[in-house]
Image (tube, rainbow, N blue to C red):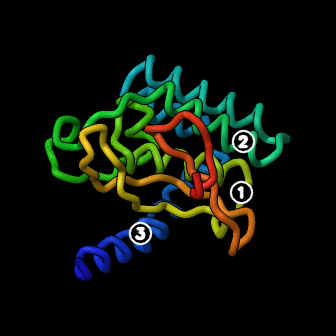
């Protein structure tokens, strides 16, 4: 159990660093991003990239909690959950925002990464965002590893959770 927790912590730290660089690579470069998506995945995917850009632009002057809610809603409605094994033929794969937009599919890490990139693009400081492993309780009573995006208004605050399973952005205490 300790080894699993340590591995998850290391993955979370590595993910934070890797995803910050992925998100920064897409910042302020939507035309380049959209062209890449069009050339790699086709016009339907490029249309979703355009929608994403419009959502970002519409949210720029909104309050942070409204930005969180709309980004969560947009991706939960636009991207279909699909297991990595089915989508990439790998047990675990962390997709770039271009791959997630291009395929319109992804697992919990992919939702988390693209939401993270979106919020960075909106100017939310990386220090307030965390890619967080949690245990997802299944209807059967079992649980499985799951990733969500957490936003901290202050370092000691109870974070708000952006989750591909729950359409509402809720405090971690709920």
Q: Where is residue 60? Give x, y as percent.
A: 79, 41
Q: Residue lying furthest front in this view?
A: 141
Q: Where is residue 4? Give x, y as percent.
A: 24, 74
Tag 2–tag 1 contact (CB < 8 Å): yes
Count of numbered badges drawn on the protein: 3
Pointer 3: what residue? 12
- In primary-sequence order, the first of circles 3 and 2 is 3
* Residue name at image x 38 percent, y 50 percent: 109
Quarter where residue 80 is shown: top left
Residue 24 seen: no
Mark 2 crowdedness (10 Å alpha carbons): few <14, some 14-19, many ≥20: many
Pointer 1: what residue? 124
| Relative side of 39 to 32, left or right | left
Front-lying residue, 165 or 30:
165
Query: For the residues marked 2 and 1, what is the alpha-carbon distance in whole angstroms?
Result: 9 Å
Pointer 2: what residue? 67
Query: For the residues marked 3 and 2, what is the alpha-carbon distance in whole angstroms?
Result: 23 Å
Quarter where residue 83 is shown: top left
């Amino acid at each position: 159990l300790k080894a699993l927790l340590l591995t998850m912590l290391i993955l979370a730290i590595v993910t934070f660093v890797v995803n910050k660089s992925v998100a920064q690579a897409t910042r302020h470069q939507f035309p380049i991003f959209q062209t890449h998506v069009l050339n790699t995945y086709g016009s339907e995917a490029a249309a979703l990239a355009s929608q994403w850009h419009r959502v970002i632009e519409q949210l720029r002057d909104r309050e942070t909690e409204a930005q969180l809610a709309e980004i969560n809603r947009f991706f939960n409605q636009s991207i279909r959950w699909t297991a990595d094994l089915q989508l990439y033929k790998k047990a675990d794969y962390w997709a770039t925002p271009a791959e997630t937009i291009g395929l319109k599919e992804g697992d919990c890490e992919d939702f988390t990464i693209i939401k993270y990139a979106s919020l960075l693009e909106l100017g939310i400081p990386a220090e307030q965002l965390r890619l967080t492993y949690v245990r997802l309780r299944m209807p059967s009573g079992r649980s499985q590893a799951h990733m969500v995006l957490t936003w901290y208004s202050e370092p000691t605050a109870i974070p708000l959770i952006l989750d591909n399973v729950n359409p509402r952005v809720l405090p971690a205490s709920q």
